[in-house]
Amino acid sequence: MSYQVLLNVRGERYLTTTKTLRNCPDTNDKSLFLKLSIPRTGELYLDRDPELFQCIFLYLLDGKLVLRYYDDLLIEMLQEEAEYFGLPSLAHKLSKLKPFQGVSRLYKNVVAPVLSFGI
């Protein structure tokens, strides 16, 4: 049974469902949310970085990594968040991304502020 949950990530709020939070795009993943007991109030506070959590949340929604920008530090921090949230396959995929060296030929014509990696 799925029901609504309000996530408060250091002030950033996400209204979602238990089904989304427990979605693991890869069968090797054991999302932290599988282990968490959602309070009766339906609100769960996460003392995590909201910007990084947004990437994790979008990954749980559709299995894609969406980044507003790309740099090595962001990728490293996202790897740590993926491990924290029980998504080792995402952490592994992030570790395979090549270090950013200026503007990549692959993305030089991208004008959208968001990059989406189907990894």
Image: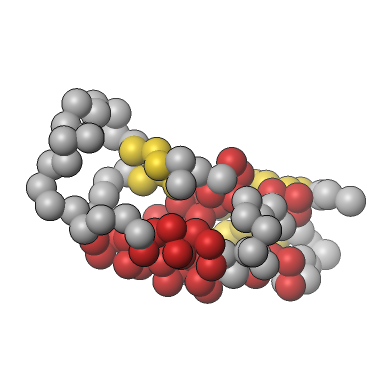
Apparent side of residue 17 relative to residue 2 in the rendered image (left or right): left
Residue 105 falls in which quadrant of the image? top left
Q: Which residue is drawn at 73% across and 66% down?
A: 34
| Residue 11 visible in the current orientation | no
Count of numbered circles on the image: 0
Apparent side of residue 82 relative to residue 71 in the rendered image (left or right): right
Position of residue 114 measured from the top left corner of the image (x, y, whole percent):
34, 36
Residue 30 falls in which quadrant of the image? bottom right
Residue 106 falls in which quadrant of the image? top left
Q: Which residue is drawn at 46% across and 64% down?
A: 91
Position of residue 99 measured from the top left corner of the image (x, y, whole percent):
21, 58
Apparent side of residue 88 relative to residue 42 in the rendered image (left or right): left
Colouring scheme applied when the structure was drawn: secondary structure
Position of residue 92 measured from the top left corner of the image (x, y, whole percent):
45, 64
Apparent side of residue 49 relative to residue 70 in the rendered image (left or right): right
Position of residue 35 measured from the top left corner of the image (x, y, whole percent):
74, 72
Q: Which of 46 and 78 is in front in this view?
A: 78
Up-down relation of residue 109 to residue 86 (above or below): above
| Residue 79 visible in the current orientation | yes
Q: Which residue is drawn at 34% across and 38% down?
A: 115
Query: Residue extending furthest right?
Result: 1
Q: Which of 92 and 84 is in front in this view?
A: 92
Q: Residue at x 83, y 49 (%)?
A: 2
